């Protein structure tokens, strides 16, 4: 907590964090609101969906090479408890490093999320959605 490069808090204002010029990539479960925030800020994402629309939101980022999945094994189930419960580890420290290293060092992810942001703005962006 003493490192000035890290902000430790039980809650963070996501849109303000994503908007900060130092933000190069992030991790998200890809709920609809968070997905729009990553998109509108032009920040590539390492995705970790759990249930519902999160899988299709993550797929949009992955299909457009605007992010990478943290976990590649799909967790198909209609049982809510099964989807939100992780009895066994589904990723390792090395998986996190590899995903972020790729997103941070390969410029294709930032370029593609920026293209998606511009396409969204051209279509009316959040102003049209609200």
Image: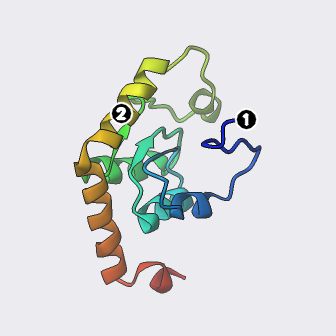
Which one is in front, 17 or 66?
17
Q: Quadrant of the N terminus?
A: top right
Colour setting: rainbow
Q: Using the image, determine if residue 86 lies above or below residue 112.
A: above
Q: Residue 87: give x, y in percent of width and height.
A: 61, 16
Asked if 89 appears above or below 47 in the picture, the reply is above
* Callout 1–callout 2 Cβ contact below 8 Å: no
Q: Is residue 107 left or right of residue 79?
A: left
Q: Which residue is mark 2?
A: 101
Residue situated in front as seen by the camera: 29 or 38: 38
Task: Please state which of residues 107 and 61 is positioned toward the viewer in this rendering.
Answer: 107
- Depth check, mark 1 against mark 2: the one in front is 1
As measured in the structure, the alpha-carbon distance from the residue carrying label 1 to the one carrying label 2 is 24 Å
Image x and y of residue 115, in percent: 26, 66
When asked about the image quadrant of residue 34, the answer is bottom right
Horizontal side of 68 relative to 18 (left or right) equals left
Q: Is residue 65 visible?
A: no
Which callout, 1 or 2, points at the residue further toward the start of the chain?
Answer: 1
Q: Position of residue 50 (x, y in %)?
A: 53, 38
Specify the quadrant of the image occupied by residue 123. bottom left
Q: Is residue 57 left or right of residue 105?
A: right
* Residue in view at x 42 percent, y 32 percent: 70
Residue behind mark 1: 2
Q: Residue at x 73, y 35 (%)?
A: 2
Find the residue positioned furthest to the left. 108
Question: In this rendering, does residue 10 appear at all?
Answer: yes
Q: Nearer the viewer, residue 65 or 8?
A: 8
126 w.r.t. 50: above or below: below
Quarter holding the C terminus is bottom right
Q: Residues within 10 Å of mark 1 (few under 14, many from 20)?
A: few
Q: Position of residue 88 (x, y in %)?
A: 56, 14
- Classify mark 1: helix, strand or loop: loop
């Amino acid at each position: 907590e003493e490192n000035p490069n890290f902000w430790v808090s039980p809650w963070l204002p996501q849109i303000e964090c994503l908007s900060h010029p130092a933000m190069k990539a992030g991790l998200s479960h890809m709920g609809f609101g968070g997905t729009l925030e990553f998109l509108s800020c032009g920040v590539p994402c390492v995705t970790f969906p759990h249930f519902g629309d999160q899988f299709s939101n993550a797929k949009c980022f992955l299909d457009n090479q605007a992010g990478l999945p943290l976990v590649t094994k799909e967790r198909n189930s209609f049982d809510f408890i099964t989807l939100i419960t992780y009895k066994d580890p589904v990723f390792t420290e090395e998986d996190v490093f590899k995903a972020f290293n790729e997103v941070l060092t390969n410029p294709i992810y930032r370029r593609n999320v920026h293209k998606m942001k511009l396409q969204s703005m051209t279509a009316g962006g959040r102003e049209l959605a609200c």
